[in-house]
Every structure is written in structure tokens, then in C-alpha cells.
Amino acid sequence: MNTSTIPYQVRGEEMLGFLAYKESPEPRPALVISHAWRGQDDFAREKAIALAELGYVGFAADVYGNGINASNDEESMELMLPLFEDRKLLQDRIKGAVDVVKNLPQTDATRIAALGYCFGGLTVLELLRSGADIRCIVSFHALLADVLGEVKAKRPANQKIQASSALFLHGHDDPMVSETDIKKVQYELDEAQVDWQFHTYGHTMHAFTNPLATEANKGIVYQPMSARRSWQSMENFLTEQFNLDREMVH
């Protein structure tokens, strides 16, 4: 396993991505991982390594810049809200990571996808909305709303979705996503002719893939069965999207 920190810039700001891959005689499909609201942390980097173990190139993006990580909810909100509001900036941040990955010698630039967790799930949805040239997105327990408290998202006009497929993996008991939010996104994807799937897991709250999620009073709880099932759904989806034999991926 090869891992390294990859510096890159977006709008003149320094970003620190995390790259993981296994040696291969040929370029491989790549996954850009968008982190949750705490920033690019061990969880995001471990996902990059896990994807590399499957045979992909894994790249954990740095959406906040300069490798910043929040240590509490207040800091997380301060980092997230400006990007939640300015969706063009959020799109540029994640597209910058995609551009880095496309130019890596280990990567097949025609087979790029993105996956994200929580705020990162929203980030990859915005990547889709931006018209980025990617194969598909996978979203784990995403935030899907355009309004958070008193902050309303400002989305660019006249953008056209290009990617053909999207997979959303969602907890039925997630208090951070309303049925209205879900229906609005599904309608948007229908209008754009996206081949979408929405998998909903019963008895499952927000952040269900993260073993550190233990705040039941906030609806943030790790659910190992749903985590396992959603990862398997992701594997199946990516195999289909990249048109790879399982023997080649594993």
C-alpha cells in the first residue's frame, strides 16, 4: 500500500489531499472521498485506504483547506456554513480534488467517481450538480437541505448534470434529512435523467457508518449492520459503473 499527502490549490488556497493506492501495471479507476463536517480526518483517510485495498485509487479531498480539522461542533459549523451557503465555492473545492486525481499517473481519467459522508455527501451532490465529468457519485448519510438554520444555500444557475448515475445510502431515522429534502433531490435527478438509487436502512440514524458516532440524543449513532450493508451496496454499484470484473477489483 502506498500513501502520501498531495498538496494542491483551489482559488489560490492550499489544500492537502491524502492519496492511497496499490501498485498496478495499468492506471486504475479512482474515488475522490469528501469528508464530513469535522474536516479530512482519520475516518476519511481510512476510507481512501479501504478503497485502495479494493483495487481503486483512493483520494481523500481537503474541502476546508490547509488540512484544517475541527475539534468540536462549534468549530465544525464555522467551517461548514460558508461552504453550505456558497455552493459555487463548495463545487470548486471538490472539483479541484477531482482535477488532481485525473492527472495522477496511477489513475484512469475516464473512470473517476466521488463519494462523501454527511456534509461530504452534500459535497458530492454539488459536484454532480456542477456538471463535472465524472462517472458517478455515492453519498452516505448526506445532508440534502438547502436551508440550515438561518442560512440558505446560494446555488449557481444554469448548471447541467453530466454524470449518469448516483447512489444515496440513507438512514430512515436520520433527523437531519426530511422527506421533503429527499423528494426534492429525487425530482431534480429525475429531471436531469440521472440513473439514481436511494437505499434506506431501517432503525438507522445519521452518521451510521462512523464507529465514533455515539450521540443518540442528536440522532448521530453508529449502526454496524447498516454500515456493512451500505459498503457492500457501494462496492456493487462501483463494480457496475466501472464495468470491472470482481476479480480485477479485489
Image: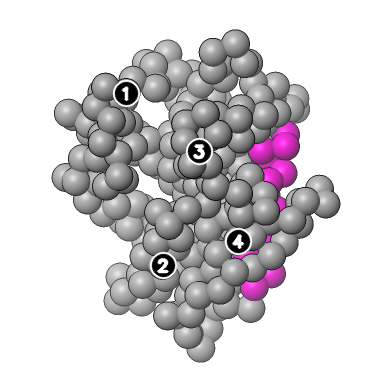
Q: Is residue 240 left or right of residue 30?
A: left
Q: In this view, does 121 lie to the left or right of 207?
A: right
Residue 158 in the image: above or below residue 47: above
> How far apart, in angstroms, are the residues tagged by discs 1 and 3?
15 Å
Q: Which type of secondary structure does the marked residue at label 4 adopt?
A: strand
- The three-letter amino acid code for the residue at tag 2 is Ile
- The three-letter amino acid code for the residue at tag 4 is Gly
The answer, for residue 140, to whether it is visible in the render is yes
Between residue 148 and residue 53, name the one nearer to us. Answer: 148
> How far apart, in angstroms, are the residues tagged by discs 1 and 4?
30 Å
Task: Say which of marks 2 and 1 sits in front.
Answer: 1
Q: In this figure, which residue is indicated by the disc labeled 2?
A: 49
Q: In this figure, which residue is indicated by the disc labeled 1?
A: 218
Identify the residue shown where x is 62% and y is 64%. 101
Which quarter of the figure is the N terminus placed in?
bottom left
Residue 196's spot in the image, x, y percent? 42, 37
Question: First in sequence: mark 1 or mark 4?
Answer: 4
Residue 169 in the image: above or below residue 242: above
Q: In this figure, which residue is indicated by the disc labeled 3?
A: 37
Examine the residues drawn in magenta and state their main secondary structure.
helix
Q: What stretch is highlighted in magenta?
A: 88-104
